[in-house]
Image (cartoon, helix red, strand yellow):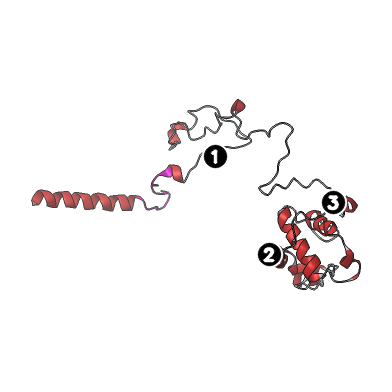
Amino acid sequence: MKIRHYINTIALAGLAFGIVSCGASGDHPGYEYAPQMYNSVAYEPLTQIKNEDEGQWLSSREDGKGEFFNSNPNNPHGMNMREPVENTVPRNNNGYLPYRLKAFELEKAAELKSPIEATDEVIAAGRVLYQQYCATCHGAGGEGDGKAGEVVGGVANLKGGAYIDLPEGHIFHVIMKGKGRMGAHGSQIPQERIWKIVHYVKQEIQKQ
């Protein structure tokens, strides 16, 4: 019985020590369980450290290499990023090509047609996206009376004048590249989402 008591005492003491040792205090960050899950190998695109022992004193990597080794042995020349296949053009997951038209090529952009059919589902999604990205300036009804639009001034009334007859490609291009006080949103909104906004503007706000 005494031996079992001692074993239980030692086990509890070890458990307590393990729990306490994981805590952080002062300059001591504590101990991590499975640190390789927190500190993944970072392949830097602009640096090449090919010495596998670099940072060995600090390493917690499972592959046994130094902490600072960051070359990719699976790619040619140890590159961390592979070059695209020759004579190919990148597309996104939905098959869209990069948008190549410049901001000043508005007339050419006006000839574009939406690759997305204007279904009820698409228009409903466009409504949500419009409220997220556009209503602040253009207003909920597209009349240029959004809260930010009141401050900025000169925001287009999408229901008035020549804006009614704008081609969908024109609207798409202006959202992508910007025009006048309208900032470019192409870096913030994917192409397919912009087309959904266009459908909502044309069919719900402008009733085209």
Q: Secondary structure at mark 1?
A: loop
Residue 206 shows in this picture: yes
The image quarter in which residue 165 lies: bottom right
Q: What amino acid type is highlighted by mark number 1?
A: Ala
Q: What amino acid type is highlighted by mark number 2?
A: Glu
Question: Principal SS element in the magenta part?
Answer: loop
Instruction: Residue 103: give its label.
Output: 3
Q: Position of residue 206 (x, y in %)?
A: 82, 70
The image quarter in which residue 167 lies: bottom right
Residue receiving disc 1: 42
Is the C-beta separation of discs 3 and 2 under 8 Å? no
Residue drawn at 42 percent across, 44 percent down:
35
The image quarter in which residue 156 lies: bottom right
Residue span colored magenta: 22-35
State the residue in front, 108 or 189. Answer: 108
State the residue in front, 19 or 112. Answer: 112
Q: CA distance from mark 1 to mark 3?
A: 36 Å
Residue drawn at 75 percent across, 62 percent down:
118
Q: CA distance from mark 1 to mark 2?
A: 40 Å
State the residue in front, 118 or 28. Answer: 118
**33 within the magenta span:** yes
Residue drawn at 52 percent across, 32 percent down:
69
Is the C-beta separation of discs 1 and 2 under 8 Å? no
Residue 189 shows in this picture: no
Q: CA distance from mark 3 to mark 2?
A: 30 Å
Instruction: Residue 121: give its label.
Output: 2
